Amino acid sequence: MRRLLLMRHAKSSWEDPALPDHDRPLNPRGLRDAARMGRWLTRENFLPDRILSSTARRARQTCEVMCAALPSVSPEPLLLPQIYEFGRIHPLLDAIASHGGEARVLLVVGHNEALHDLARHLADTGSGSDMSELHRKFPTAAIAILEFDCEDWPSAVARRGRLIRFMRPKRLQTS
């Protein structure tokens, strides 16, 4: 069995409109939410064996802050340019299949709309409320957790999985 954690980067800053999109940092809310989601992953024992991340600054910062809230054994993120994708799911599917390796729990930190489309594409079944919420919106710093009954990542992304959780930071306001 494999678990795929899809996380949208945390809220980014638009304070400097001249800054290229790739270089935008997290804003204060994004920093809080990334830490909050890392603590939630730890509490729920959804700890990644491998992390794939977009090369964008806000995604890298999301990983850094979130990983600081994970146990000290958390892996270093592998930064992949193809995860800096907004409109197509195929580069994300290819990244997961090619770089998931032996990880049983794989975390991918990316961007919308591609990440939202990927989650909806892969989530075949799941709890009604989580499925409904996932289909409606994929907010910043939200995490969709999917399970696949298979032995490798190429097999996982070739089929549909089961959405076991969909969590967004606003549901964790007090943590």
Image (spheres, grey):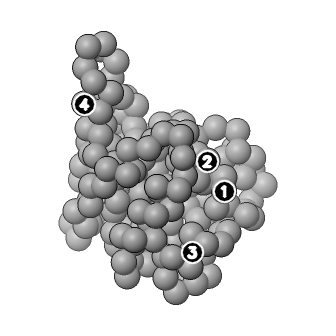
**Label located before the other in sequence (2 or 4):** 4
**Label located before the other in sequence (1 or 3):** 1
Contact (Cβ within 8 Å) of mark 3 with mark 4: no
Quadrant showing the N terminus: bottom right
Disc 4 designates what residue? 23
Q: Which amino acid lies under the numbered mark 2 shown in the image of this protein?
A: Asp
Q: Which amino acid lies under the numbered mark 4 shown in the image of this protein?
A: Asp
**Label located before the other in sequence (3 or 2):** 2
Disc 3 designates what residue? 156
Disc 2 designates what residue? 117
SS category of the residue bearing label 1: helix
SS category of the residue bearing label 4: helix
Disc 1 designates what residue? 121
Please tell me how many numbered marks the rendered image carries: 4
Contact (Cβ within 8 Å) of mark 2 with mark 4: no
Q: Position of residue 153 (x, y in %)?
A: 49, 76
Against 14, residue 81 (above or below) is below
Q: CA distance from mark 3 to mark 4?
A: 32 Å
- Crowding around mark 3 (Cα neighbors within 10 Å: few <14, some 14 to 19, many 20+) is many
Residue positioned 46% across, 55% down in the render: 91
Q: Position of residue 39 (x, y in %)?
A: 37, 53
